Amino acid sequence: MSELKLRVLFVCLGNICRSPLAEVVVKNVALEHGLSDLFHFESAGTGDWHVGKGADHRSAATALQYGLSLAQHRAQQINRRNINDWDVFVAMDAANKQDLIHLGAPITSIVMMRDFEGADVAPDVPDPYYGGDEGFEFAYRMLNENAIGLLQQLQQMRAASL
């Protein structure tokens, strides 16, 4: 871990829908709660199809609707070469979690984005890519509802590693 900031990577499949939206949502909540100095947030995909491309226009429109911007986002890939650049991985779904484990991420460094809604909730943020605009709104709401719980977990992880 870097001395000052816990390096947190939000992970989905292509890094154009869920993970970039999660990155800006959680980054914004961290800013609102005075926690920005504790974390470095980025996002990546486990696949390489969209590397270098911007966020999906529906994800960007949803973010903009809430005063957030994905204009600067460029998709990147998490792989075996850069897996050790991160302290914590926030997986959007169970398949992403398994991919991260396969790439060498320690299971103790992986958090599911929806771990903070309760035990009776499915852990996945559904991929809205093949659906309509409502799927992006649904994803935004899930991400926003879990942001505080995630930040609390990240603070505990950071404190334990100092």
Image (spheres, rainbow, N blue to C red):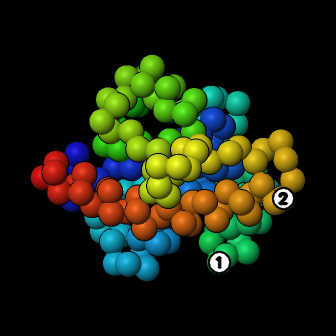
**Res 114 seen here:** yes
Are dots 1 and 2 in contact, CB under 8 Å?
Answer: no
Q: In the rendered view, tell whether residue 124 sits above or below residue 3.
A: above
* Residue drawn at the location 66% of the way across and 37% of the way down: 14
Residue under the point 27% across and 60% down: 155
Mark pair 1, 2: CA separation: 17 Å
Q: Position of residue 59 (x, y in %)?
A: 73, 58
SS for tag 1? loop
Instruction: Please give the name of the residue rendered at 85% of the width and 47% of the height, measured from the top-left corner.
Output: 131
Pick out the residue farthest to the front.
120
Q: Which residue is mark 1?
A: 67
Extreme residue toward the left, this view: 162
Quadrant (top left, top right, bottom left, bottom right) of the N terminus: top left
Amino acid at pointer 2 = Asp
Closer to the camera, 119 or 57? Answer: 119
Quick one: SS at disc 2?
helix
Identified at 54% across, 44% down, the residue is 123
Q: Looking at the picture, how far across and down is residue 152, in whole percent?
A: 33, 63
Quadrant of the image occupied by residue 21: bottom right
Q: Position of residue 145 (x, y in %)?
A: 54, 66
Of 154 and 85, which appears nearest the observer?
154
Residue topped by disc 2: 133
